[in-house]
Image (spheres, grey):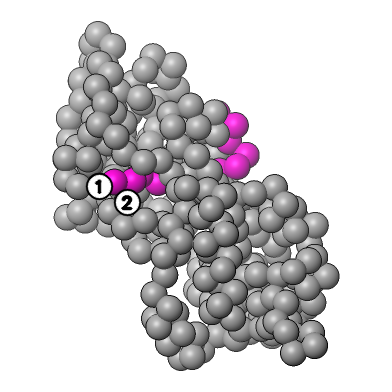
């Protein structure tokens, strides 16, 4: 199974230069040997034709099964269906309500999952960092680092981002809203987080949060993660976001970061157009299915 993962990761990297083909074979072997979650293999004539692994983790909506880029391989749709048949049976028995998958952003690979009842949820994009001249903000706008006094406005801009991503903020319960605010507060107060804000007429109208991306399969070391990138609708299409990001990424380059990653909802066409025009290329997509 580890051999299949190694082969698939190398093949994925040959198709997409922003995918990191490196992995620690021994670490992967040890983690699979000691995991409490099940892994399935499809065997035919003493040969493995596929594998599937899902880590069952707690989520706000209950137990959820996650399959990362190294968690599946299959030689054909019938192999995937056979693996899912067994996996879903066990997951349902453990109370899992949803299966989430990260797979290479390649039409054939994505179609294998959508044909099995999965729907696209989000896209992970990456780009190599190269120093370039920062674009200037329009007249009247200014960029600075965020402070604790900006937290309430950060919450308001987070709601703007939710709306752009077709998230109905009004449908969230008070506990969900409180959890979102706690997550944002923890992020902004992390020592490795940088919070950039843009002001106009002494009011914050845009923000961007950056922090080192956690280690994960397919991503390179020294990768910066971008989050909470949003501009108030009344100030959009004026170059504010690009000027803010230019400054943030040049700061990251000065600190030794070599790549940047961002994630956006696949249903958000505006985000897709913006991030790809800014130089980010899709690496992986997240799909999900209700069990």
Which residue matches tag 2? Answer: 223
Q: Which labelled disc corresponds to residue 257?
A: 1
Q: Is residue 288 left or right of residue 26?
A: right
The disc label shown at residue 197, or none: none
Disc 2 crowd rating (10 Å Cα; few below 14, some 14-19, many 20+) is many
Please name the residue shown 52% across and 62% down the image.
10
Q: Secondary structure at mark 1?
A: loop
Question: The C terminus appears in which quarter of the rendering?
Answer: bottom right
- What is the secondary structure assignment of the residue under circle 2? strand
Report if residue 173 lies within the magenta region. no
Instruction: Quote the CA–CA distance across marks 1 and 2.
Output: 6 Å
Circles 1 and 2: CB atoms closer than 8 Å: yes
The magenta segment:
257-270
The residue at 48%/27% (across/down) is 277
Percent from the top left, x then y, of residue 18?
Answer: 45, 48
Q: For this rendering, which residue is in front, 227 or 20?
A: 20
Residue 3 position in % (x across, y down): 55, 77
Q: Position of residue 92 (x, y in %)?
A: 70, 80
């Amino acid at each position: 199974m580890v051999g299949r993962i190694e082969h698939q990761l190398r093949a994925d990297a040959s198709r997409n230069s922003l995918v990191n083909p490196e992995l620690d074979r021994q670490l992967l072997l040890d983690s699979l040997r000691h995991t409490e979650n099940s892994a399935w293999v499809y065997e035919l004539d003493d040969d493995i034709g596929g594998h599937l692994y899902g880590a069952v983790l707690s989520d706000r909506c209950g137990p959820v099964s996650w399959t990362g880029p190294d968690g599946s391989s299959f030689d054909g749709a019938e192999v995937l269906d056979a693996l899912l048949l067994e996996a879903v049976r066990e997951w349902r028995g453990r109370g899992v309500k949803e299966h989430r998958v990260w797979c290479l952003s390649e039409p054939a690979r994505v179609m294998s999952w959508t044909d099995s009842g999965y729907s696209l949820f989000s896209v992970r994009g990456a780009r190599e960092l190269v120093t370039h001249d920062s674009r200037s903000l329009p007249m009247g706008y200014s960029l600075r680092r965020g402070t604790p006094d900006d937290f309430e406005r950060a919450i308001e801009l987070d709601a703007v981002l939710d709306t752009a991503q077709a998230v109905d903020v009004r449908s969230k319960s008070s506990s969900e809203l409180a959890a979102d605010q706690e997550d944002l507060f923890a992020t902004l107060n992390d020592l490795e987080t940088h919070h950039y804000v843009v002001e106009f007429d002494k009011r914050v109208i845009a923000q961007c949060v950056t922090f080192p991306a956690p280690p994960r399969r397919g991503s390179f070391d020294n990768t910066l993660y971008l989050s909470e990138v949003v501009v108030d609708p009344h100030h959009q299409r004026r170059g504010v976001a690009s000027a803010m990001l230019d400054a943030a990424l040049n700061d990251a380059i000065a600190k030794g970061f070599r790549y940047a990653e961002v994630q956006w909802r696949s249903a958000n066409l505006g985000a897709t157009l913006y991030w790809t025009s800014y130089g980010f290329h899709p690496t992986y997509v997240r799909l999900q299915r209700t069990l």
